[in-house]
Image (tube, rainbow, N blue to C red):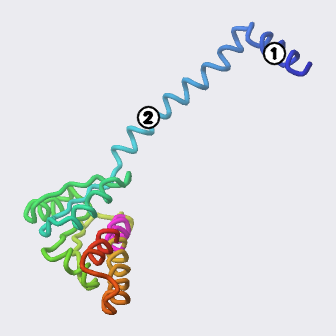
């Protein structure tokens, strides 16, 4: 009974051309707005340069994860190009990952892991710094956990060399 009334009301509503306009026009407006917002969001990404002197699995992981963030546009450059882009304000912020980055993380030595360069006109460096730091901290926390497991169980010889390697791989 209720369905019959509802279907009849919908049929009556759709017989009028103004009703069709009332349905189609809002859909077209939404599609147009979606397309324009998407173009704007791509144009407003924060330009970031990264110099990777370490070129290890850890540094590549950090760069890959930061690149996936929709707020930033990442370019990997050499140090001279990166400094030039920062000085000419083609990039808002730059990060220098030194050689030995992976070893420092594995040793839980977090002091001065990465050097950051700022463009003079940058107002978005806080956001990008937090994005980058969170990815470095994520690796550092995993390393700390693996070291804790190895200290607890490895020294008491409960884990053989293969199991210790597996702990690091899982971390």
Q: Give the main secondary structure of the magenta stretch.
A: helix
Residue sitting at x 27%, y 62%: 61
**Which numbered tag is attached to residue 126?**
none
- Tell me where residue 10 appears, x and y as whole percent: 78, 15
Q: Which quadrant is the N terminus positioned in?
A: top right
Whichever of labels 1 and 2 marks the residue nearer the N terminus, that label is 1
- Tell me where residue 75 appears, x and y as whole percent: 20, 54
Q: Residue furthest left?
A: 80
Front-most of 89 and 152? Answer: 152
SS category of the residue bearing label 2:
helix
Residue sitting at x 22%, y 61%: 60
| Label 2: few (<14), some (14–19) or many (≥20) C-alpha neighbours in 10 Å | few
Residue corresponding to mark 2 = 36
Where, by quadrant of the figure, is residue 95 drawn? Answer: bottom left
Tell me if residue 137 comes above or below residue 4 in the rendering: below
Q: Which quadrant is the C terminus positioned in?
A: bottom left
Q: Is residue 93 left or right of residue 24?
A: left
Tell me how far mark 1 sits from mark 2, CA to CA: 36 Å
State how many labels appear: 2
Residue sitting at x 19%, y 78%: 103
Residue corresponding to mark 1 = 7
> What is the magenta range?
128-137
Q: Is residue 37 left or right of residue 30?
A: left
- Tell me where residue 35 appears, x and y as whole percent: 44, 32
- Tell me where residue 111 appears, x and y as whole percent: 26, 85
Residue 163 is covered by the magenta coloring: no
């Amino acid at each position: 009974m209720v369905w019959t009334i509802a279907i009849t009301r919908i049929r009556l509503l759709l017989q009028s051309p103004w009703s069709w306009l009332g349905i189609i026009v809002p859909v077209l407006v939404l599609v147009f707005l979606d397309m324009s917002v998407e173009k704007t969001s791509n144009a407003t990404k924060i330009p970031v340069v990264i110099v990777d002197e370490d070129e290890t699995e850890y540094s590549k992981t950090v760069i890959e994860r930061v690149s996936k963030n929709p707020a930033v546009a990442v370019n990997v450059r050499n140090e001279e190009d990166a400094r030039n882009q920062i000085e000419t304000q083609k990039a808002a912020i730059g990060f220098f990952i030194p050689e030995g980055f992976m070893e420092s993380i594995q040793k839980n030595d977090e002091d001065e892991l990465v050097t950051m360069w700022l463009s003079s006109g940058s107002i978005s460096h806080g956001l990008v710094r937090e994005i980058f730091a969170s990815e470095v901290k994520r690796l550092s926390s995993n390393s700390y956990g693996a070291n804790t497991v190895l200290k607890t169980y490895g020294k008491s010889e409960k884990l053989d060399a293969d199991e210790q390697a597996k702990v690091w791989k899982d971390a």
